Amino acid sequence: MRLVIAKCSVDYIGRLTAHLPPAIRLIMVKSDGSVLVHSDTGGYKPLMWMTPPCRLSQTDGLWSVVNKGGEELQITVEEILHDTDHTLGIDPGLVKDGVEAHLQVLLAAAPHTLGEGYTLVRREYMTAIGPVDLLCKDAEGASVAVEIKRRGEIDGVEQLTRYLELLGRDPLLAPVRGIFAAQEIKPQARVLAEDRGIRCVVLDYNALRGVVKDELTLF
Amino acid sequence: MRLVIAKCSVDYIGRLTAHLPPAIRLIMVKSDGSVLVHSDTGGYKPLMWMTPPCRLSQTDGLWSVVNKGGEELQITVEEILHDTDHTLGIDPGLVKDGVEAHLQVLLAAAPHTLGEGYTLVRREYMTAIGPVDLLCKDAEGASVAVEIKRRGEIDGVEQLTRYLELLGRDPLLAPVRGIFAAQEIKPQARVLAEDRGIRCVVLDYNALRGVVKDELTLF
DNA sequence: GTATGCATTTCGTCA
DNA sequence: TGACGAAGTGCATAC
């Protein structure tokens, strides 16, 4: 990894065109060829960048980074204040926990948290337009399709609506009700869901994990 | 901006938990307090980060970055290979061109590219659920609502459908047809749109710019 | 401040 | 490889 602190102006010509007037910035050149231009503020997003695969050519003060699609990053370097190169080696990956997939696993393990007497039919129940997160049966044996999101927004309700329409045509399942389950449900999504007779359930990740853990401990 | 190359392990405890085993990485500390941990590959996105506002405290080899929400980034530094500090100053902003807003301006200036005799009624025509990108009239004076996207996907069709449903109830406008215009339209979105009687139009940004430029030159 | 939609989204997964 | 959905999305803007 090469780290350059330099006074430079930058131009991007690709999906859009953008320009940065001259200023002192960090230019990071990674070993895979990708280039990132960072300022001293603004969090994790670079001001400009080129993702791999791409190629850097350098003539005098003009650096040019080009990718396969013909997009180009032009860096005009006026003055270099710092320039070092470092060998980092390959990085072992990272381990995540707590995303939507995990919510689905937890809810599949504890379907009764959705309602008294609820049982799981299948996770990822496949339909012609994609898999429904959970298909359950309620205490009376009626079908319930469950859409799980971390953040429940309007498009999630639309998605569930499409599934319900399709599943409702299956005489073996019909009638099929819907549950929109999320850690957080936006007001507009809730209004739309309830207007369509879809029940909204707010999930508590830690509580759910506790419930499942307790049940595992019982056996 | 402080640049540290170090052998370190990193833990994030916040919206999710994640762990990075020891390896040599770049730790970037920006002047606004934000911290980015980058590996030598992978482009754009840091392996882990903390966005401002946040605070970095450092005791021996243990760095802790905490934000207001109680999220924490723990960096265990085993060995420092490089450590420099740089003054960058504030960065002048960047100038963009070519995004959705520009497509809308161009199409508003050349509505006839959507169809012979098409005229513009209004850009950002306001409805109860938000503004329609363009409201036009066709050669016969019938209303046409236009949704513009850079990439046309299924949720854009859903959005336009909601607008059409609402606009269709207005006796001054009804009946209202729909056009889904994008630089690129995904197959599933096209199928859904056409199934609902919505016409799909693929936009050529450069051609559109040329048309508008030519027309401006005429006057 | 909250909600909404865009992004050079990036990034993963799965068919 | 392409399409589709999630993201510790981030970010600007309208309300």
Image (tube, coloured by chain):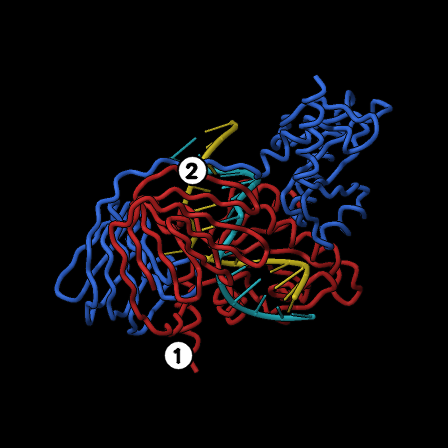
Chain colours: A red, B blue, C cyan, D yellow
Q: Amino acid at mark 2?
A: Leu
- Residue at disc 1, secondary structure: helix
User: Closer to the camera: disc 1 or disc 2?
Assistant: 2
Q: Which residue is mark 1?
A: A217
Asked if badge 1 and badge 2 are on a common chain, one would say no
**Residue B4, picture quadrant:** bottom left
Q: Residue at x 72, y 65 (%)?
A: A127
Q: Which mark is residue B94?
A: 2
Instruction: Point out the residue furthest to the right here.
Output: B140
Q: Amino acid at mark 1?
A: Thr
Rate crowding at label 1 as few (under 14), some (14 to 19) or many (20 or more) other CA atoms within 10 Å. few
Chain label for disc 2 = B
Q: Nearer the viewer, residue B160 or A101?
A: B160
Horizontal and vertical percent position of residue A41:
31, 44
Q: Is residue B133 above or below residue A216?
A: above
Q: Is residue B154 above or below residue A212?
A: above
Horizontal and vertical percent position of residue A96:
41, 67
Q: Along the horizontal axis of the image, is B145 left or right of A18?
A: right
Q: Is residue A2 above or below residue B78?
A: above
Horizontal and vertical percent position of residue B23:
30, 73
Rate crowding at label 2 as few (under 14), some (14 to 19) or many (20 or more) other CA atoms within 10 Å. few
Instruction: Point out the residue furthest to the bottom here.
Output: A219
Q: Quadrant of the N terminus of chain A?
A: bottom left
Q: Is residue B140 above or below residue B85?
A: above
Chain label for disc 1 = A
Q: Residue at x 68, y 48 (%)?
A: B184
